[in-house]
Image (tube, rainbow, N blue to C red):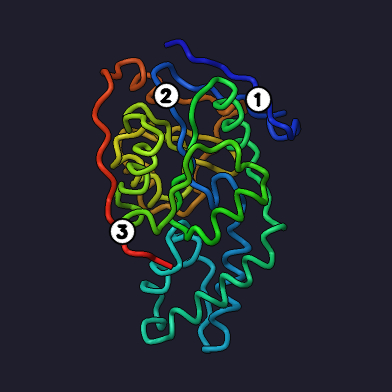
Amino acid sequence: MNKRTLASSSPHPALGASCSPAIPDGILAVIFDFDGTLADTTANQEQSLRAALQPYGLDLDTDWYRRRFGLSIHDLLAALPGARQLPHDEIIGRSRAHLLAHMNTIAPIACSVALLHAAREAGLPCAVASAASRILVHPGIEALGLGPQFEAVVTREDAARGKPAPELFLEAARRIGVPPERCLAVEDAPDGIASALAAGMHVLRVVDGHLAPTGDSGEDTAGLPSGAGVPMPPGCALGLAAARRAATQSGPASVPAPSTADSDR
């Protein structure tokens, strides 16, 4: 299987120094998650939610949180033991205020950004499909200087259901006009990987700052915390399974219509 090995033209040369992504033939677009995929926001988000919960006497267990990183804060609070009766809107407001105040401290994830610039250099449209709110995702993208790289940014408000349902990735594919099966999704969290696979996309996952292939189902990542597993060797190339899927890809299919969503803010 031939792959297009793409040299990064990132304005941040150090980002691509140890990561030369390869995109299989047949891929027409790349869709990225944001938190934990393009930006290393795990510590900031955990700290912000913990600080927001403190006035209510509720602690946030690190292991519990890391297993669910990638969910929207609404979904996290709905699942958090002891938080059901707390004022979710107030907690969310406190957490988001903390995050926005520290937005300039987030760092890019080098391999993902290198893949983004390589895809753009090759003329592939790119999008973001995030389970977080637009009030955080858009400032985060701008803080990394990546705004001009994306043709569409889809956030939790843009779909009826968040990850692991496929709607966010399907909506991103619809907005850029590329069939889902011709899209490469890049994710870090199990729910996000399950979402992209359910949308029928090829998937790379972020593992300890590297890009690793997934199988045809979510069984290899189900229940694992973000970053679990073995990193790919230097080069971040796609695995053979992903390459074979691209090689046997059929012609374009219709792109699903958008979902009608209630705001998750």
Distance CA(mark 1)–CA(mark 3): 36 Å
Q: Earlier in the sequence, mark 1 or mark 3?
A: 1
Which residue: 51% across, 73% down? 61
Q: Nearer the viewer, mark 1 or mark 3?
A: 3
Specify the amino acid type for callout 3: Ala
Does residue 51 lie above or below 222 as drawn? Answer: below
Distance CA(mark 2)–CA(mark 3): 27 Å
Q: Are marks 2 and 3 in contact (CB under 8 Å)?
A: no
Which residue: 37% across, 54% down? 158
The quadrant of the picture occupied by the C terminus is bottom left
Q: Nearer the viewer, mark 2 or mark 1?
A: 2
Q: Nearer the viewer, mark 2 or mark 3?
A: 3
Pointer 2: what residue? 28
Does residue 22 lie above or below 167 as drawn? Answer: above
- Tell me if mark 1 has few (under 14), some (14-19) or many (20+) residues whose alpha carbon lies within 10 angstroms of its own: many
Specify the amino acid type for callout 2: Leu
Specify the amino acid type for callout 1: Ser
Secondary structure at numbered mark 2: loop
Quadrant housing residue 242: top left
Q: Are marks 2 and 1 in contact (CB under 8 Å)?
A: no
Quadrant housing residue 176: top left
- Locate residue 25, reporting x and y percent: 42, 16
- Locate residue 247, reporting x and y percent: 35, 15
Which residue: 53% across, 61% down? 135
Pointer 1: what residue? 8
Secondary structure at numbered mark 3: loop
Q: Earlier in the sequence, mark 2 or mark 3?
A: 2
Q: Is residue 240 left or right of residue 20?
A: left
Judging depth in this view, the residue of 139 and 48 nearest the camera is 139
The quadrant of the picture occupied by the N terminus is top left
Pointer 3: what residue? 261
Q: Earlier in the sequence, mark 2 or mark 1?
A: 1
